[in-house]
Image (cartoon, grey):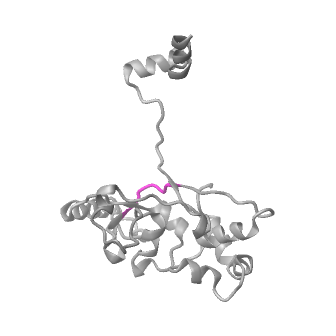
């Protein structure tokens, strides 16, 4: 009975197609467009990932810099040239340059410039974003995507959780630097602040990929 129990706990039935894919080492899942998740919960309810233990060990005992850098922190540190960009656009337009050297970043920028060259008989297209941007506070660099990513986030109920719903809309579709002060502004609730930004939110939300 113990052997039978062990089989049920450690094995599962698979289809013939899955067995063939696994035996041949074929890819079972792939996607041509990257997906980006943006946490839009209220700050007190938001989950963040701790830094590796090797990084925590060298921090000062009083240091509060114990979390990994996420898309929100990078958005806050975006260069001043992107002041008017909302978080949703930033998330789908830019990707992190992990461990990229200065020469590699220069090559990326040059390659993008070559891709942007237009035929002589056509007017040059307006370039909306820089190929590579440097984040403030030495947070690294980010590269403009050639294909916009798919934005993913938690959808709150407008009827059951109105404050969370309007906070998420303000967070995604308005430009801000300080989440606590910029999203509320001079209002006491996120719903009131949302009404004052209604035109801006509707305009930004209409051009984004489906959430």
Q: How many marks?
A: 0
Give the residue displayed 62% in from the left and 68% down from the top. 42
The answer to whether residue 44 is magenta is no
Segment colored magenta: 143-150
Residue 121 seen in render:
yes
87 vs 194, left or right, is left
Quadrant in which the C terminus appears: bottom right
Q: Which percent across, then down, holds residue 204?
A: 61, 70
Q: Which percent across, then down, holds residue 209?
A: 59, 56
Q: Quadrant of residue 80?
A: bottom left
60 vs 149, left or right, is left
Q: Quadrant of residue 8?
A: top right
The secondary structure that most of the magenta stretch takes on is: loop
Q: Which percent across, then down, holds residue 68?
A: 40, 62
Q: Nearer the viewer, residue 132 or 193?
A: 193
Give the residue displayed 46% in from the left and 64% down from the top. 71
Q: Nearer the viewer, residue 73 or 208?
A: 73
The answer to whether residue 148 is magenta is yes
Q: Which percent across, then down, holds residue 20?
A: 45, 17
Residue 172 seen in render:
no
Residue 183's place in the image compared with 18, above or below, is below
Quadrant in which the N terminus appears: top right
Q: Quadrant of residue 94?
A: bottom left
Q: Nearer the viewer, residue 150 or 64?
A: 64
Residue 133's place in the image compared with 51, above or below, is below
Q: Residue reaching furthest right?
A: 159
Q: Residue reaching furthest bottom?
A: 186
């Amino acid at each position: 009975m113990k052997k039978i129990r062990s089989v049920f706990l450690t094995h599962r039935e698979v289809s013939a197609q899955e067995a063939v894919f696994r035996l041949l080492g074929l890819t079972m899942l792939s996607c041509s467009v990257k997906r980006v998740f943006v946490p839009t919960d209220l700050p007190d309810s938001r989950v963040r990932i701790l830094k590796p233990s090797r990084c925590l060990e060298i921090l000062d005992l009083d240091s509060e810099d114990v979390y990994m850098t996420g898309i929100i922190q990078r958005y806050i540190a975006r260069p001043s040239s992107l002041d008017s960009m909302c978080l949703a656009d930033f998330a789908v337009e830019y990707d992190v340059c992990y461990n990229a050297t200065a020469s590699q970043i220069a090559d990326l920028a040059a390659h993008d410039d070559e891709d942007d060259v237009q035929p002589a008989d056509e007017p040059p297209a307006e370039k909306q974003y820089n190929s590579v941007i440097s984040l403030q506070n030495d947070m690294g660099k980010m590269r403009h995507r050639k294909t916009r990513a798919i934005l993913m986030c938690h959808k709150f109920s407008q009827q059951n959780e109105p404050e969370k719903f309007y906070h998420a809309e303000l967070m995604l579709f308005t430009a801000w630097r300080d989440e606590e002060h910029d999203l509320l502004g001079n209002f006491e609730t996120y719903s009131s602040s949302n009404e004052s930004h209604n035109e801006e939110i509707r305009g930004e939300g209409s051009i984004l990929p489906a959430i």
